Image (cartoon, rainbow, N blue to C red):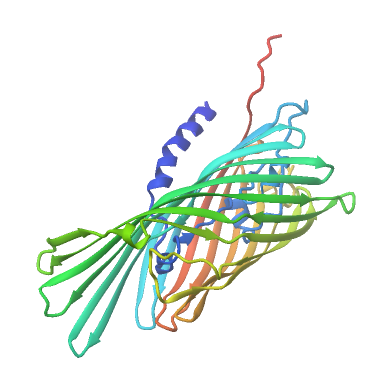
Amino acid sequence: MIKKIVIAIMCIASAGIYAQEGSVSPYSYFGIGELRTTSTVENQMMGGLGVYADSIHVNLTNPAAYSKLGISQNNKVGLTVYTAGISHNRVTLSSFTEEEKTALTNLDYLALGFSLGKGLGIGFGLMPYTSSGYNIEQNITTSDGLTENVYTGGGGLNKVYFSVGYEFIKDLSFGATANFNFGTINSSRVQVVEGIQFGTFDRRESQIEGIDFNLALNYTPKITEKHTLYSSVRIKTQGNLSSKNSQEIGSFSSDNGVNIELKQVDLAAQNLNNTEFKIAPATTLGLGYGEEKKWFLGAEYTFQSLDSFSNDFLGATNITYGDASNFSLGGFYIPEHSSFTSYLKRVTYRAGMRLDNSGMIVNNKEIKDFGITFGLGLPLGRSFSNINLGFELGRRGTTTADLIEEKYFKINIGLSLNDLWFQKRKIN
């Protein structure tokens, strides 16, 4: 019965992923929107680390980890892990002179992972990839009067993925993920000039799709009888995205908002009706050390060159791109995973931190993001299933150079359920 319930929830929720507004950040105006978190709650609460893999959790950022998914006692029928995560984010947006608070709740991922035998696992799922959601007002006072510009945007990209991981040599695993990215991004600029009866608008829409791949190599040898070294190299290949664009411009009455004139722009004449852009490859190096079912500590570093990225159709003029990077540090501790006397001893305690250099340089300022994470993994009864609670405190951007600083507090809830599927029933 629980399988049927979870499948029904996933089918309903998948529509929610496609429809939700996933960002309130003014920085989602640039590029293809704000990049969403692509890891499970368990990994997010360790600073976003993907180097660690175990037998009862899906690792969305490291396809080689699927080779570790649990095996049943007969070593033929593997565990199935189905997982989902939601988040609630409370954000304070601050300029040099003003402050505004807002909040949003999102479904972050839906995924299934299967063990098909010792050392072989696969998985697939659906999750947001980027989100655009902003409302920016700009007032300019000149000798001719006040000009008000309002920029709004919404939409984003989702991804459907399929992963496989295989341990082809003892302690050495390889994995690959194929991602299909798709979605629509909308943007609008409305301008009203003081003393002029009519305002103007410029509305743009991009329908985007494309593919990329994640490749991973994990090496997890035993250093001592109890302790394991965790290491990984992961490469996200170049993302090749194509965009089908449309644009309309016109004027409206400043008194009642009724359109006066509306015109479809001939983008084909400008070679902008169909555009292509590429997301540069990213490489992640991870290293960790720990005792299985007891404790783990690890770190990761990701680097990516974005200096060649551009979105000609959007036409933003106050941004350039450089080298992006991410550093993460985190781990977990379990007092006694098999304790019969204390539930708290079976809880997994996680913590971490991360520092992102986004590669975006807006008004000559590089946009950085710093976060501190912590959380709990709560076992469900005596099974391998668990509920994961996570919390994140962070800050992105700056109030200098006419920019916005974002302070946020995010609450994450993740569900990881383990079961035996594809097992033949036997009658004695």
With 1 as the anchor, is 155 left or right in this view? left
With 281 as the anchor, is 171 left or right in this view? right
With 154 as the anchor, is 286 left or right in this view? right
Q: Residue at x 45, y 35 (%)?
A: 11
Residue extending farthest to the top is 428
Q: Is residue 181 above or below residue 261?
A: above
With 8 as the anchor, is 77 left or right in this view? right
Residue 323 visible somewhere in the drawing: yes
Residue 38 position, x and y percent, is 56, 53
Residue 177 position, x and y percent, is 62, 45
Residue extending farthest to the bottom is 143
Q: Residue at x 37, y 68 (%)?
A: 101
Q: Is residue 281 above or below residue 117?
A: below
Residue 342 visible somewhere in the drawing: no
Residue 358's image quarter? Answer: bottom right
Q: Residue at x 44, y 41 (%)?
A: 14
Towards the viewer: 126 or 419: 126
Residue 316 position, x and y percent, is 39, 71
User: How many numbered marks have been drawn onto this rendered protein structure?
Assistant: 0
Q: Quadrant where the C terminus lies?
A: top right
Towards the viewer: 276 or 59: 276
